[in-house]
Image: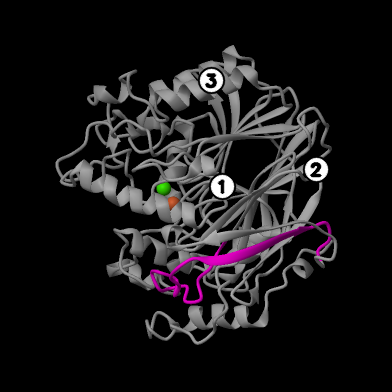
Amino acid sequence: MPLRSSLRLPRRSLLTGAAALAGFAILPHATRAQSANPFTLGVASGDPDPDGFVLWTRLAPQPLAPDGGLSGAVAVQWEIATDEAMRQVVQRGEAQADDRFAHSVHIEATGLQPNRPYWYRFTALGAQSAVGRARTAPAPGDALDRLRCVIASCSNYEIGYFSAYRHMAAENPDLILFLGDYIYETNNEGERAALTVRRHANPEPKDLAGYRVRYAQYRTDPDLQALHAAAPCLMTWDDHEVENDYADQWSARPATDPQDFLRRRAAAYQAYYEHMPLRRLSLPDGPGMRVYDRARFGTLVEFFVLDGRQYRAREACPGPTWAGGHAVTAACTERDDPARSMLGAAQEAWLFDGFRQAGARWNIMAQDLLVASLAQKTQAGEWAHWTDGWDGYPASRTRVLEAIAQSRLANPVFLGGDVHAFFTTDLKADFDDPRSATVATEFVGTSVTSEPAPYDRFIQLLPDNPHIRFFDSRQRGYLSADLTPAHLEMRMQVITDRRDPQAGVSTLRRWVVEDGKVGAVAA
Ligand code: FE
Ligand code: CA
């Protein structure tokens, strides 16, 4: 059924959102609005399983105030129905929203029927939320003919409108994957200010109040609200949810004390929890928060959602003023140290265990980064690799690909983001040997809005990286996948112009991966 008709935004909520978007950058206090509507941030669902999913909203009558314009406990009613008009309500309940988690609610619905759509809404403070659509997964042993999944990464609010999100919603997806850089902590300043089409509402966030404002502002975006209301999501983060190029407790700025950085990280993680449809599994725990998880859809597919930031080793060979991404040559022997991990020992063990137990037709690793090696030559003719991505953790990457090969994992496919470019790659047992086995297929999606990877420079690297089958960074957009038992079809979707709030969409490239055959084929 047409998606748009399921989005019943109350008129007041639309007005509040529009006022916030139009007015805030100029008049920071203009959105301390008169409207009491608390549903300014929309609704969302997440992590579907065969008998339920997570439902989310956050009450924020003043979305850009750090406290959302509320204090004290507020009762929130929720309802789940089998029809979008919300006439056949099958479950309802009440939750308390309070200051501890910024009046967010995370309802873990259970006891629903497998493999069917449901609609949901919230009521609080005399107002009703938009109606969102969720969907349960099939029972583990049940077949599923088709799953449509749309995949996003890297949405910088200041430099573009979220047309990609609007078009993702219009694809009527069963599932959304957010692969990181859902917000950007930095503001466009200096020469980058020319790229700005709308302003972040607050200075770079460093504490909980700041991150709450940042996440809330993104959630006022009508295209993002439409996407979340359209389907449940699985999500992981990359670096900008906290700070560019961080690694575990280490800021990319080496002068930052790890204890200070962990305080900042804890604030950012908590705000992420408060704004995402996450389960109790992800409740913030000191400076840590678990987001890695598995999600299975019958016999068709299992998703392994990975966390590439929280547990990784410090980036190799840091400089005196910059410890984040930079190119290093073989002189940086630390890069090859097998003790270093991208995922951390516990997550690696969990993942390899999952590979051994896996039973679905397709196995998709949803994570934040380009996995394939991208070697570049220095002016002196030496090979160099970037430290922030998987190239900075080659031993960890080898362990993951070896575990896939050893467990004979069926149809392994990696999805990633971070680089603001489309990639199709063959993940090789040995990236230095083009004749070595291809272990898995990889697709990376371009950014929703963020600045492209430098096209001319990257194109020149391709002859030295024959496992990279396709690269293009020139357009913004997302990935859209149709999975069936027989094949995976992957579409690289591009929008016409990130500066145009009404941008159109088209398909740049189409790929197919056949069941039982590793590697993508151009379609
Ligand atoms: Fe990014
Ligand atoms: Ca990133």
Residue of label 3: 352
Closer to the N terminus: mark 1 or mark 3?
3
Q: Secondary structure at mark 1?
A: loop
Report the front residue among 15 and 406.
Answer: 15
Residue of label 2: 115
Q: Is mark 1 within 8 Å of ligand 1?
A: no
Res 9 visible: yes
Height in image: 39 above or below 388? Answer: below
Amino acid marked by disc 1: Gly
Q: Quadrant of residue 413?
A: top right
Question: Principal SS element in the magenta part?
Answer: loop
Q: Secondary structure at mark 2?
A: loop
What residue is drawn where x is 79% and y is 52%? 117
Q: Quadrant of residue 250?
A: top left
What residue is drawn where x is 34% and y is 18%? 338
| Magenta extent | 57-84
Question: Mark 1 against mark 2, which lies toward the viewer?
Answer: 2
Question: Mark 3 against mark 2, which lies toward the viewer?
Answer: 2
Spatial CA distance of label 3 from label 2 is: 28 Å
Name the quarter where the N terminus is drawn. bottom right
The verdict on residue 135 being magenta is no
What residue is drawn where x is 79% and y is 36%? 484
Q: Position of residue 408 (x, y in %)?
A: 64, 15
The verdict on residue 81 being magenta is yes
Which mark is on residue 43?
none
Name the quarter where the C terminus is drawn. top right
Report the front residue among 491 and 384.
Answer: 491
Amino acid marked by disc 2: Asn
Residue of label 1: 445
Q: In the image, is 24 to the left or to the right of 38?
A: left
Q: Secondary structure at mark 3?
A: helix
